[in-house]
Amino acid sequence: MIDTHSHILAGLDDGAATMEETLGLLEQAVEEGITGIIATPHGHHPNFPTDVPKMQLQLEATRQLVLEKNLPLEIYSGQECRLSDKLPERLASGEALPLAESRYVLLELPSNGVPAYTVQIIQELIASNYIPIIAHAERNQGIIEKPERLSKLLLHGAVAQVTAGSVAGTFGKAIQKTAMSLINANLIHVYGSDVHHLERRPFHFIEGLDYLEKKKLGDVAEILLENNERIVNNEQLIILEPQSIKITKWWDILG
């Protein structure tokens, strides 16, 4: 199983702070049955400086740690790229990184909404032969309030990722309901942990998959995991026909 979203590289952002913490996360990943992790430190986030050479050094140090500890893991390069009108040129110049050296780009929107120019950036990325993956779509306030906003982004060529902890309910009932609504509407294509910390923000990878199985969505879970594999192989994703989305009312969330 491949994890497509992680903050395991030490000292780069709000993820692992030390190599000791990185090792703990790697060992937890093995316990969860994960065989490959795409390292996706924040890229050009307003709160975290971006230093691609330092990222590359940390990536190699993490790969060396995997070898030293004989862990059955493959570590891939990547970034969680903040939405910006400069993103296409940053990818072209190597100042921003796609996932696992593929054409897939993990795109982070501001958490409070979907900016008006998002469609334009998606179109520019598509024109440059990249496929943007909307990170943790279920946790974006604009999409929570109006899921059709995600549908619009997908119509322009993007795909969407859900966080394992959202499915498992660790971000709260409202986020879990949004995540399940998007999954049931076939608006989610990729699965990632967004792991940050061994205790505060662990993987929840299997927990989320088990919840999908409990809800009789094991076939969907298999497609999400297959798509994760396809990303590292730079292959076309499985895209199911979108369905009408059931809007979750606030009284359903509280009930």
Image (spheres, rainbow, N blue to C red):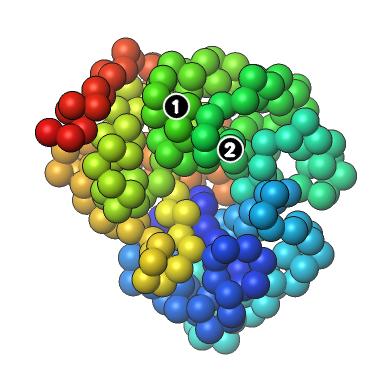
Q: Is residue 55 left or right of residue 37?
A: right
Residue 240 versus residue 114: which sits nearer the camera? 114
In the figure, residue 8 lies in which quadrant? bottom right
Residue corresponding to mark 2: 110
The image shows residue 125 at horizontal and vertical percentages of 72, 28
Mark 1 vs mark 2, CA separation in Å: 11 Å
- Mark 1 residue element: helix
Residue drawn at x 81%, y 35% as measured from the top left: 86
| Disc 1 target residue | 143
SS for tag 2?
loop
Q: Is residue 22 left or right of residue 89?
A: left
Identify the residue at horizontal 29%, vertical 28% (top origin). 181
- 10 Å neighbourhood of mark 1: few (<14), some, or many (≥20)? many
Instruction: Tell me if I can see residue 238 in this picture.
Output: no
Residue type indicated by callout 1: Ile
Can you name the residue that lies furthest to the bottom here?
A: 68
Q: Position of residue 66 (x, y in %)?
A: 55, 78
Q: Relative to 11, is 34 above or below?
A: above
